[in-house]
Structures are given as C-alpha cells and as structure tokens.
Amino acid sequence: MGVLQLVAKRLGLGAVTLLVVSIIIFGAVELLPGDLAQQILGQAATPETVKAMREELGLDRPAPVRYVEWLGGALQGDFGTSLANKRSVAEQLGPRFTNTLFLAALAAAFSVPISIVLGVLAALYRESVFDRIANVATLTSISSPEFFLGYILILFLSVQNPIFPSISSVSADMPFDERVYVTLLPAITLTLVVIAHMMRMTRAAIIALLASPYIEMARLKGEPRWKVIAVHALPNALAPIINVVALNLAYLITGVVLVEIVFVYPGVGQLLVDSVTKRDFPVVQACCLVFAATYILLNLTADVGAILSNPRLRHPK
Amino acid sequence: MSDQNDARKSLLLKIRGLRIEGRADEKWFEIVHGVDLDLHRGEVMGLIGESGAGKSTIGLAAMGFTRDGCRISAGSIEFDGMELTSSPEEDLRMLRGARIAYVAQSAAASFNPAHKLIDQHTAAPVQHRIKTRKESEADAMELYRRLRLPNPDEIGFRYPHQVSGGQLQRAMTAMAMSCRPDLIIFDEPTTALDVTTQIEVLAAIRDIVDQFDTAALYITHDLAVVAQMADRIKVLLKGDEVEEADTRSMLANPKEDYTKSLWAVRSFQRQQKPPAEAGETPVISVNGVSASYGPVKVLENVSFDIHRGRTVAVVGESGSGKSTAARCITGLLPPTQGDIRHNGQVLPASFRNRSKDQLRQAQMIYQMADTALNPKKRIGEIIGRPVAFYRGLRGADLKKRVDELLDQIELEPSQYYHRVPSELSGGQKQRVGIARALAAEPEFIICDEVTSALDQLVAEGILKLLDRLQEDLNLAYMFITHDLATVRSIADEVVVMKEGQVVEAGPKDEMFKPPHHEYTDLLLSSVPEMDPDWLDGLLEQRGVDNIGEAARK
C-alpha cells in the first residue's frame, strides 16, 4: 500500500471517529436529567411557558432531527446560540479558541525542543549525573498538579519578584510581544507539566535502539557518540516520539482548564467551565466538539508523521 | 596466496592471553580464557567454532570493542604496535572504520534503515578525514563495480530495504573497504544468505581482500566456507583455542579430537526408505494448491504427497514458497485454489473450521526455538498445554504424560519440568519444541528449518532424535530446509521449489544424481564443499559473472 493510500485511510478513520464523538457528545447532553426549558425558566416555569420555551428551543422535535441540524450547522461553523446571553456560540468561541491555541503554541515552542534535546542528552549520557538530575527534575514537575506549579510560579515570579503579571489578560488588539509577555507564566507552567513525558519517551525510544546491529556498526565505523545517537538512533526513534509529542500537544489544548483558571486566561477552558455552571448547553457542546476535533486531528497528524518517518513507506521498492 | 609474499609479511595483530568476561545475574563470568592470535599483513585467518565459542567476542576485541555487559579482563591486543586494551576510547575511535573495519552477519540489520547506502558508506572516510564526501562517493561506485553489484553508479542512492540481501552484504563489504583498512573483521558474513547468493558474496569478498591485500579475520561456523576463504584456521571451543594450522593441513590432518568431530559431523545419514506402495493413501496430500498474500501470488499449483513414516524434504531458497506451503497445510493461509487432504479426506481450508482432531494432525516445529517458546512458562506447562487441550488430561495423568514426553526427547523430567526456556540451551529448547508437537499425538509434523539455528553437533543430535521418533511412532515429516546436507542425511523424498512452484520432485537417491533440473543443479553445486579449491573450480566452471543472482535468471 502506498503512502497516499495509508494517509487517506487514516484521514477517513479520523472523520469517522469525529462523527462518533459528535453523536456521543450530543447524546450525553440529551441524557442529562431534567428538562432544559424548565431549568432555564426556573421559578417562572408553568406548563404553558415550558411548552412555549420548548417550542422556541426546538426541543419538541425528535432528537435525531435536532442532531442532524446541529451537526449540519457545526460543519458550517454555526454552533447555535448561547442560552445565557443569546449571542452566537461561534462568536464567543472563536476568539477564546484563538487564545487557547496561542497559549498552547507558546508552550509547545518551549517544551518540544527542550524535551527532545534533553531526551537525546539523557540517552547520550545515560546513567550519568546529568541523566539522573534531568529525570528527577522532570518527574518532580510532572508529579505536581499544574495549579500548584502555577501558584508557585506566581509566588516567585510575580509576587516576590514582580517580573511577570500574575493575571494573563489578553485582548485581541494586543501587540504580539506584549501578548507573549503576559502569556509567559501559564506557558511555562504547561511546559513544566508536559516536558517529562516527552523527554522520557525520547530517551527510552533511543535507548531501545542502542542494542541494534546498525548502532553497533556505526560505533565500529568510529563515529562519535553524539553522531551515533543523533544521526543513527534518533531518525529511527521518531515514530514513538512523534506520537508522544502529539499526545502532549493535544493535552496542551484540551487540558489547560486548570491553568487558564489560575491565570484567569480567557481561553476555551474558562469558557467551558463558565458554561457548565450556567448550564449553557449549546456552548458546552461546541467546546466539547472543538476539543474532540483537536484531539483527533493531532493524533491523526502523529499517525501520518509516523508513517512518513518510515523510510520503507516513503521509498517503496 | 599465503606463500608468495612471505618476505614482506609483518605482524599486524598480536593478541596474547586475551581474557574477556561477560556479566550475567550480577556476576562476571569469563567467556574467553586466554587466547593468543597472530595475524600478518594480507593474511586471512578463519576463526571457527560453535556458538558460545567466543569467535565474535574475539573479533570485536580485535577492534578494542566489547559489547555492553562484556569487558576485557586480561591480556594484550596489539594492532600495528598500538596496545588497544589500554588506549583511550577516543584513540580507538580513530582506529575503527579507518584502519580496522567490521562486516556484520546480517547486512539487512546492520545498515541503518533511515539512511541511503551511500551516506552510510561515506560516513567513515569523511569522519576520519581520509576522503572528502565527493571522493568517497566516487570510490564507493568504483568499489560497487569491483564487487559486481548491479547499477554501481545508482545502487548507493537506494535505502537498505530497496536492495536484496546478497547485494547488501556486498555493499557492506564495500563500506568496510571505504577507508582501505589494514584489517577487516568478517563476522559470519554469509550465514544469513541462500547458498546461491552466498557464492557471489564469498567470491566478492575474496576478490577484494586479494586486490587490496587486506588482512582479515573470517569468523564462521561453516567449515566448508572457511576452507574457501582462509589461509590459516583457528578452531575455538567455549572460549579456548583448540588448535591452529594452515587451511590445507587442518582439513587434511586435524590433530585434536574436537576438530575431528567437527570435520566428521556431516556423516550422519539414515537409510532411505523404500517408496510407499502405489495406491497407499498419503497422510497429507497437497493438491494443486495456489495461494497469495493479498494481490501477491506466492504459490502456484503446488502438489506433493507425504506418506506414513516418510520424510519429505522441501528445499528452495528464501522466497520460494516452502514455508507458505506449510502455512497452507496447517490452515493458517487458506489456499485460493486446490485443497489439502489428510488420509484422503479434504481438510477445511482455514484452521478456524477444522475440528480438534483435524488440528491435532498437523503440528509444527519452528526454526527459532527461542521465539517459539513462551519465555514466562515452565517447560512442564509448555508441553502440558497441548496434552490438556487435545487429550483432556488433568492432574497426575497430565504430569505422567508430560514426563513420558520429556523422556522421549531425552530430557530428564525431574530436572527440566520446572525450568523456564531461558534456562535451556538452544538444542534443549528445540527438543522442547519437538515434545510440544508430539504432545498432540499427530501423524504428521512440519519441521520448519529446525536445525538451521543450531550448531552442527547439536543439529545432528536433533536429526537423530527426529529419526528415532519417526521409527517409534511411524511419523510423517515435512522437512523444510535450505540446507542440502540436512536433506542428504534425513530425507526419503525431495521436493525442490522455486518462485512458488515445484520444479522437481522425487526420491532422494535420484534427486542427488544427475541429470537434474537446471535449478536443482544450481542449488546442489552452490553448496560449499570442504575442498579449499572448490570455489576456484566453480568460478572457473561457471565464470564470475554467472554466479549467484545472475545464474538464477
């Protein structure tokens, strides 16, 4: 099977997964106890008003019909209107999602290169003092909850030494450098959380290859140690590394809820938490769908990356 | 080759009292017990012995290298006046690839799959600043040409998986030559190859070593191969030297008993049984079977019969469809055409549709006993599982039956019942594989290259055991192998396969006598013989351009 076919197959599978997830999200909201109209009306709920509200929300029609409508809208970027403030969901979600992506990209820009370099160095100097310190340090950071790390960073970097703002309020018209500056603390927090996983996987993937005959061959050709690791082991260890990087990138986007709240960062996580408290279901559904799509897309990228990193598939006989 | 240049021969490698230790279970064990070795410039020395003799370990030590978990504990290794055991790693690194090069057993595994051949070829010369990248590339093409690789100007720009095994092995020899080293360590360079491919690699290696007057340590367990390649032979056993002499006198006149036993090993031969009577229903009958993996056709109209108490050897090179035929018989790969009959009854094509009794009839013994036995299970459990599955025995009855089976394979039950596979030697593991097949009480066993991973003496033990079991239990064997010596010793009938088809079949005595089908002839004549002049004779007869892959077309 050629690369294109393999990639096309993965993309098709991704689309199917997304469809299944959309059904689950819609179904889960549908299954929530209580009547949506009644809850919105609260005290003012009389049988008549509830009926009118149900008609207004379209809840009197069967669920499959509403699902198809919702999905059809979502595909065109229309996620319905918010129950809380009657504004379009897409309008609220758009800028928030951009903010979240910005934070994730900033964190990734730090964490991915750092962790791969650390992983390669740890493999190169395995069992050395450097290896142990890197291991202990990254394990410590991954073992601490992110809100705790966030508060520690606030304590040291904005309270005791006022270098960074403790509240990361960004707005759309902010210049890029200022935006980076205010987003730096949450980005560092996230970096500390994801770095251990990626670094340890890089180290393990490389070390697993060190016993292979082609690594021995490279050593017996008199190539220096760093070259053996970086030129001979790393390219063959790419598939697992790409996978763990993609998994962590997905986490950076979907797992940031706590960090966004600690730093009062206006991202999707904040929006999701607010909407859940307000029982604003169209927004919750939209957030979940966006998160799911991100997750699937990143895993898809990892799969495609792993396929492309395999020379047997890139260069067929 | 050795005599004419005696005058300018100086000592290149001098090893004295070399002791190497390996680490296992938190303890150091000595695996090489004080070996001496002298190698002169331009000389080829063959190191032979069974696995565990320390051949490869000594070969690597000659580069000042030990694998992880090994260390040089005593002795000296002097290469061209430089003491390697006490040299700093950086100095050794400058030596490796530049002045001493290594050719590994499996070129397929030893070329990095992520880089093109040419990039791997030029790495050492560029690293050691011996040639520029451009010079080295041009040199690579020249070497590829001398090694008679097809498309020498283009082949280097391929990835390893795009090149065949025999070509890769020659490309690796070219890579070893890239810095024109003084010494090359050849570590079983042809063991993983088919006989017809082996010849071209042997011829290429010998040629290039002669052309550049390179010294070499040629490590192998195959006596016939070493007879073609080496000026002198050193025999090793369990980390000790047994004896050393020049090739001809070693072959003609071995002194030590162990060497004699190595030389005599191909003597086991059992009488060919008379062919089955006409009209007798065969135990297994393969009937016009075709099969494919997806769109790739691998078997085409294959037919042969296997009779009770007989051994049918299926021979051919890798990719000829031998193992696929076995997969069709066991039902792992349902044929696209034709059928498999057991005692005249057609078996369901897929193993999923076969009854327990039908499944029981076709058992397998595998090439790699290491991977075919579950490393976490005890021997008693491994053999007991099919006994319980097929016979439904439990408790004391089960134990009794397993003990019987262990007795049959000549392993003492009380001693081996509770061991795990890692506590057994290679030959013992293969015996357990045999017992597991016997546990189902089959009429028919498929032996897939069962002796190819074993040393010759151990392999002979396994062949004798299989032969005795055949006598006792009237078993039918399908013996898949590429080793014609094994065929000579154990087969009643021979089926020769090539590219998914049966090219010739018949009783063994007829098959080994001319006239043959030309492919059978090619296979037979490609098997190295103990005669040191065999390769020369063959090259003369066939011509250098008509061996290996070229000859197969």
Image (cartoon, coloured by chain):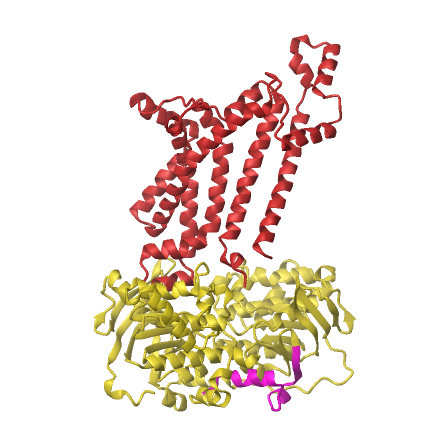
Q: Which x, y percent locates residue B144?
A: 42, 73
Left-right relation of B342 to A294: right
Residue B35 is situated, as x and y percent measured from the top left of the image, at: 30, 75
Can you tell which quarter of the image residue B314 is in?
bottom right
The x and y percentages for residue A58 are 72, 21
Confirm whether the magenta stretch covers residue B527: yes
Give the x, y percent position of residue B296: 64, 65
Number of callouts in the render?
0
Q: Which chain is red?
A: A
Q: Report the residue at 41% width, 69% height from top.
A: B104
Task: Tell me if I can see residue B389 in this picture.
Answer: yes
For chain B, the rendered hue is yellow
Q: Position of B38 compared to A13: left or right?
A: left
B502 or B26: nearer the viewer = B502
Magenta-colored span: B502-530
Is there any visible trace of residue B187 in the rendered image?
no
Quarter occupied by the C terminus of chain A: bottom right
Q: Quadrant of the image for the N terminus of chain A?
A: bottom right
